[in-house]
Image (cartoon, rainbow, N blue to C red):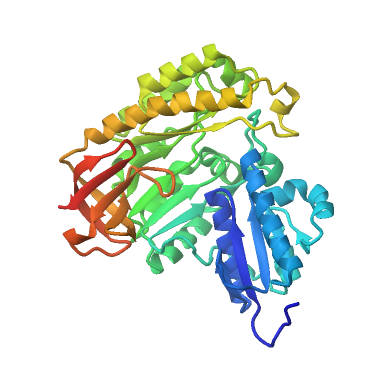
Amino acid sequence: MKTRSHRNPKVNVITLGCSKNLVDSEVLMGQLRASEFDVEHETAREADIVIINTCGFIDNAKQESIDTILQYAGAKADGKLEKLYVTGCLSHRYKDELQGEIPEVDAWFGTLDMPHLLRTVGADYKHELIGERLQVTPRHYAYIKISEGCNRPCSFCAIPLMRGKHVSKSFEQIEAEVKNRVKNGTKEFMLIAQDSTYYGLDLYGERKLAELLKRVSDIEGAEWIRLHYAFPSQFPEDVLPVMAERSNICKYLDIPVQHHSDRMLKIMRRGITSRRSEELLTRIREQVPGIALRTTLLLGHPGETEADIDELCSFVEHFKFDRLGVFTYSHEENTHAHTLPDDVPAEVKEARASRIMEIQQEISDAANAALLGKELKVLIDRIEGEHYVGRTEFDSPEVDNEVFIPTAGGYLRVGDFAQVRITSHTPYDLFGDIA
């Protein structure tokens, strides 16, 4: 069994799931560091305490969370760590069931329990640190959470069960956080939320996303600003002229449409029709010339037929999203869709997802081919072997295309911007030389 010497406790924080979870871990780590804990993120180094920040969105994510908890529960049983704590979405949703099944976990915490977690670990929750955190992404980019929770009634989504109702951060909180990150060398800011288009409605009585974009855009040193997770229904179109006129707001929008069949949109409780959705997307492209639109599609929802998929495929082929991802339906208890039979077999869900992605691969390949010979502004994320690897303003970290540049062509640092002439491509990546 490990014995504690008179030193600061070593804490290893493990983050699973989305970028919003990553922000929560960064805030937690900032609080621990302020209480003089020796804290690291996803380190292989031996630790006294492990805190796992879990995801509970769909089956695959839940299984990954459980597997990770069991891995560290085994390490604790072997005497390799003193304390094991679990927080985040899975813990919030299933802690009553899990705490009896995995007794090695010392305590389980929900998504809003950070002060309690810190007290349990032996740290003080410092209110004066609100907006500050220990950043674990590369220094040059950061995720900025502009709100928490969601008020949308989507049939398939368990996020409101785990994160609660929508709560916006104030303008001042967000501005302070961005300014703090700029001082530390951050250049790119991803504004994220469960539903960014709802921003401000609870605080200011109306949607204020456009004003928020202006305020963040005015901050000196915020060189790229990127907007994620914009709900199509009731989209605040006053953001479009702001995006068009501000050079430091990336011509990029993540707007998950989920489906295009009117029948499925109604069953999924998306609050929009296919015609209104397509009209909105067309207006976005018209009002923000050159914008890259990313979307997400959900395949295999209860009641989905081959006719619905045919309609969705036709839409994807016609509209040609710049970036597109898919996920397959997971039958989540306590959601509206859970009252319906999960009537699409798993292999059919996967086949439908593959069909969509084959279409998107051709679209992406053609779009990349059209960039041959062009010069693009690229932000360098890392060095990989004999290449610098970066992104254009049309690509977000982790999920989108990358640009590979030979290191032999000149000296660049991670976090630098470079002009790159595109020389070749694959369906999802670009290759080029320093211009």
**Which residue appears at 63% of the width and 71% of the height?**
11
Residue 332 image offset from top left, x and y in percent: 70, 34
Residue 390 image offset from top left, x and y in percent: 31, 53
Residue 134 image offset from top left, x and y in percent: 52, 67
The number of numbered discs placed on residues in the rendered structure image is 0
- With respect to residue 105, does 34 lie above or below? below
Q: Quadrant of residue 350?
A: top right
Q: Quadrant of residue 127?
A: bottom right
Instruction: Say if residue 186 shows up in the picture.
Output: yes
- With respect to residue 69, does 293 lie above or below? above
> Which of the two residues, 56 or 20, is positioned nearer the viewer here?
56
**Which residue appears at 41% of the width and 54% of the height?**
189
Residue 104 image offset from top left, x and y in percent: 78, 62
Judge from the rendering whether residue 209 lies leftward or rightward of residue 336; answer left or right. Answer: left
- With respect to residue 6, does 67 lie above or below? above
> Which of the two residues, 91 or 207, is positioned nearer the viewer here?
91
